[in-house]
Image: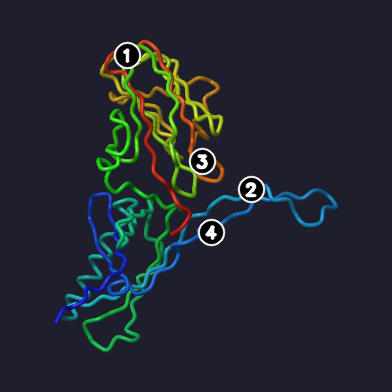
């Protein structure tokens, strides 16, 4: 008789020191909430004698994820040992961790900057065996948007032009002899804005990247030496400009650069999610290059 393998989404907690635990739904993990829309905060204003209010905008609040899981050991001491292992993963001394969902079709979604918030309430309701226990706890993701890492970077590169390289998160790479002046179409396939990382490899002078779709740019009044790599990270809470020696180059950004807001729009804000990215630079040698890296991000799963 052929036994049909039970399928279900797999949830994983990954700590900063690479500790892991796997929770398969609906077996080990029996109930979960908070995966779709995060909490919203609407900013409004009201003038004298105005009926109602005027909506100024909406921001996302931290995401709350409620989990109920089923612990089952060979005996009661092992059951409590499993509980202790879960507690160790969420030790605040280890810092924030990732909460990951792996779907049967291979898609992966991750929450970053997640910490334990409350709970670890134990219950035996519905458990008829003494070595079993239900465990409930709550996580909070201060970055409430889901990241979707690429599944296979090398496989994607074969479908594009030979000079495109895919190390981790869909980067686009160019290599030109003396001057860089290229417009490429970068597709944000998610449904939320993405904050990319821009990387310039020297030699290159006056490296600039513009998003013609959002009318934002980043310009460095700086000459990158041969062998030097300059990285501009536009992630909120980071916003850094550094080289591979660790030097802070933030002061070389032009006064009209948009480091605070530079992003990639999703559809329909950008038609079909296409952002036109314009790279420029002069006095390039044989190794002068520019590339952009980003994650597609989603409001919910």
Quarter holding the C terminus is: bottom left
Q: Are marks 3 and 4 in contact (CB under 8 Å)?
A: no
Pointer 3 or 4: first along the chain? 4
Pointer 1 or 2: first along the chain? 2
Q: Residue at x 48, y 38 (%)?
A: 274
Give the Cα distance between marks 1 and 4: 50 Å
Identify the residue position indicated by label 4 in the image.
39
Mark 3 or 4: in front is 3
Whether residue 77 is situated above or below residue 196 in the rendered picture: below
Whether residue 129 is situated above or below residue 139 in the rendered picture: below
Identify the residue position indicated by label 3 in the image.
265
Disc 3 is placed on an element classified as loop
Question: In the shown orientation, is residue 234 left or right of residue 163?
Answer: right
Residue 119: x and y, percent? 39, 69
Q: Viewer-proximal residue, 225 or 274?
A: 274
Give the Cα distance between marks 1 and 3: 31 Å
Identify the residue position indicated by label 1 in the image.
177
Pointer 4 or 2: first along the chain? 4
Residue 89: x and y, percent? 27, 59
Mark 2 or 3: in front is 3
Identify the residue position indicated by label 2 in the image.
57
Give the Cα distance between marks 3 and 4: 21 Å
Q: Residue furthest bottom?
A: 128
Question: In the shown orientation, is residue 111 left or right of residue 84?
Answer: right
Whether residue 82 is situated above or below residue 248 in the rendered picture: below
Residue 237 appears in the rendering: no
Q: Residue at x 49, y 49 (%)?
A: 191
Pointer 2 or 3: first along the chain? 2
């Amino acid at each position: 008789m052929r036994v049909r393998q039970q399928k279900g989404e797999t949830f994983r907690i990954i700590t900063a020191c690479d500790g892991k635990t796997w929770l398969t739904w609906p077996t080990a993990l029996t109930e979960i909430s908070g995966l779709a829309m995060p909490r919203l905060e609407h900013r409004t204003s009201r003038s004298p004698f105005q009926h109602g209010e005027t909506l100024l905008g909406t921001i996302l609040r931290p995401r709350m994820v409620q989990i109920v899981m089923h612990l089952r050991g060979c005996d009661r001491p092992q059951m409590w040992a499993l509980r202790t292992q879960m507690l160790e993963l969420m030790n605040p001394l280890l810092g924030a961790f990732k909460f990951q969902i792996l779907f049967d079709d291979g898609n992966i979604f991750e929450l970053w900057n997640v910490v334990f918030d409350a709970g670890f309430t134990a219950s035996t309701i519905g458990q008829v065996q003494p070595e079993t226990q239900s465990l409930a706890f709550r996580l909070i993701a201060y970055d409430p948007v889901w990241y979707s890492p690429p599944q296979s970077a090398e496989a994607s590169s074969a479908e594009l032009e030979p000079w495109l390289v895919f190390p981790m998160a869909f980067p686009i790479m160019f290599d030109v002899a003396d001057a860089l002046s290229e417009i490429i179409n970068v597709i944000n396939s998610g449904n939320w804005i993405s904050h990319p990382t821009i990387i310039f490899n020297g030699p290159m002078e006056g490296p600039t990247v513009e998003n013609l779709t959002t009318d934002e740019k980043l310009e460095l009044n700086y000459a990158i030496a041969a062998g030097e790599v300059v990285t501009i990270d536009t992630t909120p809470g980071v916003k850094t400009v550094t080289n591979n020696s660790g030097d802070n180059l933030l002061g070389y950004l032009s006064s009209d650069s948009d480091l605070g807001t530079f992003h990639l729009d999703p559809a329909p804000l950008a038609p079909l999610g296409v952002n036109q990215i314009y790279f420029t630079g002069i006095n390039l040698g044989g190794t002068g290059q520019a590339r952009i890296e980003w994650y597609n991000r989603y409001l919910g799963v």
